[in-house]
Amino acid sequence: MKRYLKYIIMGIVAVTLYTLFFPGKDKEKGKPRDYQTIVESGILRAVTEYNSISYFADGDTVSGFHYELLNAFARSKGLTPEIIPEMSFEKRQEGILTGKYDILANSTIVTSESKDSFLFTHPILLNKQVLVQRKPELENDSMYIHSQLELARKTLHVVKGSPVLLRIHNLSNEIGDTIYIQEVEKYGPEQLLAMVAHGDIDYTVCDESIAQASINDFPQLDIKTAISFTQFYSWGVSKHSPILLDSLNAWLDTYTLTPESENYKRNTIISDFLYGLNCKILIYLQSELLSFQEK
C-alpha cells in the first residue's frame, strides 16, 4: 500500500495547485468564447497537463513550456491568464467543449478524429510516442520488447481517452495481432512511467519528451522503442472560436521571427528534456521572459 501512496500524492498535486493559485475561482460551464468575448472579460482561461514539460511547481514557483508560452501570449494581448492543470485528458477536452476553458494548451496530437471536435493551431512541437519499459535484467529477458512486432499479446497501460489509443489500435492492425490496452483514469503519463520503473506495471506509452525528462530519475527505464512516427503537436480551441485560433496562429508565427530569438539562440543550450520541441519558439520564449523580468 505504501508504494502506491506516492502515485496518489502525485495525482492530487494538480488539484492542490489549483486551490493555491486560484482560490474560489471555479467557473460555471457555458458556451465556448471567441476572441472578442475573451478580450472584453480581460481573462484568458486555459487548461494544461501537470507534468515536467507543460506545467510544474518548483517550490512556490510554477514553470513549464506551455505555462510560459501561454503567459507570453496573454501578456502580449493585455490579458490575465488563468492556467489550470488537469490530470484527466477527457476532462481537459470536455472543458474546451463546454466553454470552461478557452485553450487546450498541452501537447495534443492532431489527428483526423481530433479535428472533428477541435480547431488546432499551427504546430507548436514535434514529438513522438515511445514505449516505456524496464531495461532487461537478463540477456534473453522475455519481458523486454525489442520491436513493435513483439507487442503482440502484451498489455499496455495508458491514460484513459488519450490519443495514443488510436495509434495502438492501428499498430495492432499493422502487426496482425492483439495488443491489450488497460486504460487508467486517475494517473497521468508521468505517474504511469513511475509505476513501470517500480515494477507495478510492465509497459506504458507516453510522449518522448516526457519520457526523456524523467529518465534521469529512473535509469532502470528503457524508451528506445518508438510507437509512432514523429508527429505535429498543437494547441486546441473550440470550433466556436475561429477568431481566437487566428489570433493564436498570427502570434505564434510572429513569435518565431523576432531578432531576440536569433540573438538568444546563440547563447542558449537546450536541455535534453526539450528534445523534439520547436526550438525557435522556445528560444524566443526564454528571451522574452528575461526581458520582461528586467523591466
Image: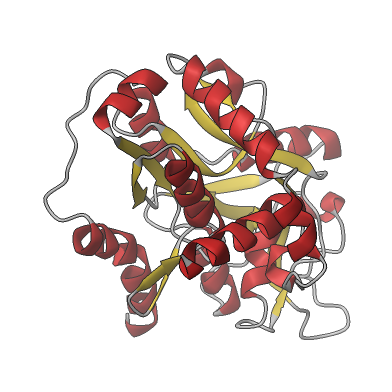
Say which quarter of the image contains residue 222: bottom right
Q: Is residue 207 visible?
A: no
Q: Is residue 188 left or right of residue 129?
A: left
Picture residue at 39% right of the left edge, 82% below the top: 3
Say which quarter of the image contains residue 154: bottom right
Q: Nearer the viewer, residue 46 or 87?
A: 46
Q: Position of residue 33 (x, y in %)?
A: 34, 21
Q: Is residue 89 left or right of residue 198?
A: left
Picture residue at 72% right of the left edge, 47% below the top: 258
Q: Position of residue 38 (x, y in %)?
A: 33, 27
Picture residue at 39% right of the left edge, 29% below the top: 96
Q: Position of residue 182 (x, y in %)?
A: 52, 49
Image quadrant where one finds the N terminus:
bottom left
Q: Is residue 73 visible?
A: yes
Q: Residue furthest front?
A: 295
User: Is residue 51 placed above or below 28 in the rendered structure?
Assistant: below
Q: Position of residue 179 (x, y in %)?
A: 69, 45
Q: Nearer the viewer, residue 218 or 235?
A: 235
Picture residue at 75% right of the left edge, 43% below the top: 257
Q: Is residue 90 left or right of residue 217?
A: left
Q: Residue furthest left?
A: 24
Coloring basis for residues: secondary structure
User: Is residue 151 placed above or below 255 in the rendered structure?
Assistant: below
